[in-house]
Amino acid sequence: MSVPRDHPRYHSLMQREKLARGYEQGITVIEGLIAHGRGEAFDYLIGEATAEPAKRAIRAAAATLLLASMPVISVNGNTAALCPAQLVHLARVANAKLEVNLFYRSRERARRIAAVLKQAGAEEVLGVEPEAEIPNLSSERRLVAKRGIYSADVVLLAIEDGDRTEALVEMGKRVIAIDLNPLSRTAQRASITIVDEVTRALPLLTQEVEKLRGLSKAQLEELASFDNRANLKAMLRHITQRLSELEP
């Protein structure tokens, strides 16, 4: 299908096409397409734009990435299908590693996702042959790279299940989540939650990392100090306000 550029839902329909194409290529799974649809519903609620609470979270996330000694960006099928170049660009700017981590895992699917990232410019992608496990986690997401997520001090993830987020936090890691649902366990358990659509959030996060790079450690630490629960409440107030304004 060819989506007309003047279609009012062009961006949304193109994302669906990318995910469907990813399924045909063995990158995404049907369950991931369902998760994307749920996220779209929340995007309607926030107004399909980056809200102020999300901008605050992006700033804190950028400072956190710059302070990290070993940041890792976790990549699943949906993000690989939607925004591989953006992931690679952020990894380069933030000096972070890229790692494939999947709930519905097969070695072949992990290999295909790594190939997509390398085609987008990544020099190294971890996670195809995991050597370590996240403690207290039974799903396939427990399988991680020793030099990647297992040893990371900061992990950035998107379109996530809450179990791994909780397990990573229990390991003492700071978790930055990009999640359109402010009520999800991922959003609630993460250290910093960016409630925004991933292809909007990643370029803004990359720009913020570049902008903050010249700040001192003390300045970055001040920006990275973040009350995630208070910010999620602000996002819920934003949604409530929008809904009240839309009442007929």
Image: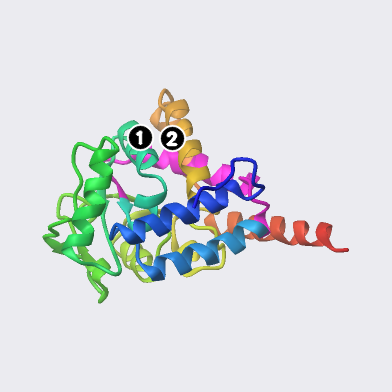
Q: Is residue 156 visible?
A: no
Task: Report the front residue among 132 and 139.
Answer: 139
**The stretch drawn in magenta includes residue 225:** no
Residue 35 at x, y = what percent?
47, 67
Question: Local crowd at mark 2 within 10 Å, few (<14), some, or many (≥20)?
Answer: many
Element under label 1?
helix
Which amino acid, by three-letter code, is at mark 2? Thr
N-terminal of the pair, mark 1 or mark 2, is 1
Residue drawn at x 85%, y 63% as measured from the top left: 247
Residue 150 at x, y = what percent?
21, 57
Residue 68 at x, y = what percent?
32, 41
Q: Which residues make up the magenta segment?
A: 45-73
Residue drawn at x 83%, y 57% as measured from the top left: 245
156 relative to 184 in the view: left or right: left
**The stretch drawn in magenta includes residue 57:** yes
Q: Would you identify the image quadrant in which residue 141 lies? A: bottom left
Residue 157 at x, y = what percent?
38, 54
Give me the disc on residue 89: 1
Q: Would you identify the image quadrant in which residue 195 lies? A: bottom right
Helix, strand or loop for the magenta stretch, by majority: helix
Using the image, determine if residue 29 lies above or below residue 55.
below
Asked if labels 2 and 1 touch by Cβ distance under 8 angstroms, the answer is yes
Most extreme residue toward the bottom, as rendered? 138
Task: Report the front residue among 243 and 60.
Answer: 243
Most extreme residue toward the front, as rendered? 1
Q: Is residue 64 visible?
A: yes
Give me the disc on residue 206: 2
